[in-house]
Amino acid sequence: MDMLLNPLNRRHRLRYDIPVVPGAFPLVGHLPAIVCDLPRLLRRAERTLGSHFWLDFGPAGHLMTCVDPDAFALLRHKDVSSALIEEIAPELLGGTLVAQDGGAHRQARDAIKAAFLPKGLTQAGIGDLFAPVIRARVQAWRDRGDITILRETGDLMLKLIFSLMGIPAQDLPRWHRKYRQLLQLIVAPPVDLPGLPLRRGRAARDWIDAQLRQFVRDARVHAARTGLINDMVNAFDRSDNALSDDILVANIRLLLLAGHDTTASTMAWTVIELARQPVLWDALVEEAQRVGAVPTRHEDMAQCPVAEALFRETLRVHPATTLLPRRALQELQLGQRRIPAGTHLCIPLLHFSTSALLHEAPDQFRLARWLQRTEPIRPVDMLQFGTGPHVCIGYHLVWLVLVQFCIALALTMDKAGVRPRLLSGVEKGQRYYPTAHPSMTIRIGFS
């Protein structure tokens, strides 16, 4: 940790009477520690500075971070805005649901949310569409014998998302290339010159948006077709107030981004935990054998409690979204402090996800906490998807994909008499920001 903090900046300072975490570097602030070792950074800051402190996010500025459980309530607070997200990543998230508030957010969300509910996903045949794609991919893993897990789950999620959009298989390589260039906008320096990440990322975004506009036009011409994109367009066009196609295109692009990166990370961690803990694998195989086939509808998933518990516990221990930025519109009481209006806030989902105040034995990966519960799922149990008006619209889609993946993996590998085994360590090379994922070097064998 010490190597990730600036040794020349260890003086304790206050900002609006709240301590600033020492060790920020010029230009990049605390980003090296945030990216590479966020859990230890948060624990150290809480131990030495208390529950409220400032972190320096470099180009994104200082964000007041609160590890008091009261901070989770900010996600539902009427005087807290999500617009800061668009200011931090305007090239990528401008005009999307995650960066809008109030009437604009409700109007855009209401226009497309039906397509993402269990009924909409079932009517669109999403489970039937995904199941053969997932089975084919895990069968290829079995035949190869060992894989680099995050690369493989990332490619699988791209294929699933592209299948949602009806992208022909022969077009996938070009989409892969444009998509990876688009991701450069997350970290691109603000220098717009030929060959640099900002220029390449913008060009990729414009190309993708042009393709998405064609998908929207095709959906309107063939309105009777089924599928998630057609359902989104039809619902959008039936909304009470006319919305520009720019909003629809931006949010389909958000589906492309959010559905890939975060779900691929959760999928990779699921396989890693199954390889680390043979008892988990045995329980999943037993369930898969009983079910006998990959579920395709949300009502089928009630038969897969172990697979669902794996999905929820993996998200809890390894949240793909670790931090959420917000802005205080009015003065707030947060824990024992008054927070001035206009303060930029950081809500550390990673901290709450593994907090002893919210979870029993939080450092243990335990399916029993889900299998033995009798009360309904609470907002804090799915905090990785946010809560309140900004709860992730893709929650049910991700739930379906992860349960399908777990059952397909167990059926395929058990039929061949093999199980996942770790071929490399998992502790080094993890990343926590802007989204979290395991190391790109982790290899899984099937034997």
Image (cartoon, rainbow, N blue to C red):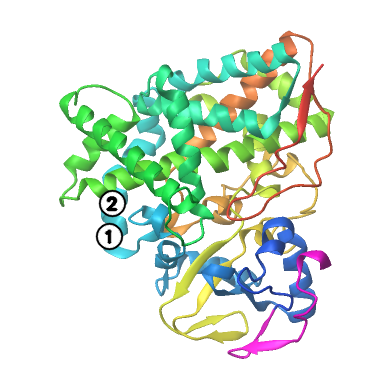
Residue 172 sits above or below residue 50 on the image: above
Residue 261 pos. (x, y %): 55, 41
* The disc label shown at residue 108, or none: 2
Q: Tell me: 278 left or right of 231.
A: right
Residue 74 pos. (x, y %): 50, 69
Residue 173 sits above or below residue 70 on the image: above
Kindly indicate whether the residue at mark 1 contacts the one at mark 2 (C-beta within 8 angstroms): yes
Helix, strand or loop for disc 1: helix
**Kind of residue sitting beneath label 1:** Ala
Does the segment drawn in magenta span residue 46? no
Residue beneath the point at 16% across and 52% down: 241
Q: Tell me: 221 left or right of 353.
A: left
Residue positioned most to the front = 194
Q: Quadrant of the C terminus?
A: top right
**Label 2 to label 1: alpha-carbon separation:** 6 Å
Q: 352 or 218: nearer the eye? A: 218
Residue 313 pos. (x, y %): 68, 43
Residue 322 sits above or below residue 312 on the image: below
The range drawn in magenta is 1-20
Helix, strand or loop for disc 2: helix
Residue assigned mark 1? 104
Q: Quadrant of the N terminus?
A: bottom right
